[in-house]
Image: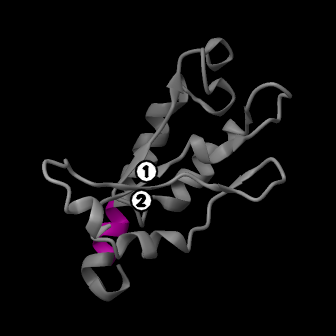
Amino acid sequence: MEKLKSVKGHGPVWVTERGSTFGYGNLVVDFQSFPHLRKTGCPVVFDATHSVQKPGALGNATGGAREMIPTLARAAATCVDGFFFEVHDCPEKAHSDGPNAMRLEQFGDLLDQLLVLWRAGRAAALQDPAGK
């Protein structure tokens, strides 16, 4: 991290959890990584849609489990600074990442839920700064 930050003219550095693959066609998010990422001193972002990818699941393309996006996002909401989402009005017609894209009509409700959880996480961190 220090090497990256030492580069002249670099912009802000954010760290992202996107899931890891273990060779069985499924990305897995290790929620223990969030406190470790926080120790970098950089904002922590959760890529909620990449984390539900299923590499090679469609044979010649990546599949996904979009129904899991809200569950994983809500689980991460109290310990991240932000999110990344692929959102599309018709994921079946998306040029890329369709199987793991959030449906646009469902996105607003999820954002409302995440904001409540995110605020609760910030309040808890203020109560116990060491637990951040």
Up-down: is 44 above or below 51?
A: below
Check residue 39 for magenta coloring. Answer: no
Question: For mark 2, what is the residue?
Answer: 117
Q: What residue is pinned by disc 1? A: 114
Is residue 38 among what the camera can see?
Answer: yes
Q: Amino acid at mark 2?
A: Leu
Q: Are marks 2 and 1 in contact (CB under 8 Å)?
A: yes
Which class describes the residues within 10 Å of circle 1: few (<14), some (14-19), or many (20+)? many
Q: Where is residue 90 drawn, in percent x and y?
A: 60, 15
- Give residue 28's position: percent from left, percent from top: 68, 58
Q: Quadrant of residue 69?
A: top right
Quadrant that contains the N terminus: bottom left
Q: Position of residue 88 (x, y in %)?
A: 53, 21
Question: Between residues 72 and 86, which one lies in front from this camera angle?
Answer: 86
Q: Residue at x 64, y 24 (%)?
A: 98
The magenta stretch is: 119-124
Which sits in the foreground, 114 or 82? 82
Does 39 sit above or below residue 65?
Answer: below
Left or right: residue 23 versus residue 18 is: right
> Magenta part mainly helix, strand or loop?
helix
Q: Residue at x 68, y 16 (%)?
A: 92
Q: Find the distance from the CA under tag 2 to the CA under tag 1.
A: 5 Å
Q: Is residue 45 left or right of residue 93?
A: left
Secondary structure of the residue carrying numbered label 2: helix
- Which amino acid type is marked by label 1? Leu
Q: Position of residue 14 (x, y in %)?
A: 32, 54
Q: Is residue 28 above or below residue 103?
A: below
Is 88 displayed left or right of 10 in the figure?
right
Quadrant of the rendered structure where residue 130 is? bottom left
Q: Is 71 rendered above or below residue 104?
A: below
Within 10 Å of disc 2 (Cα), the crowding (few <14, some 14-19, many 20+) is some
Question: How many numbered marks appear?
Answer: 2
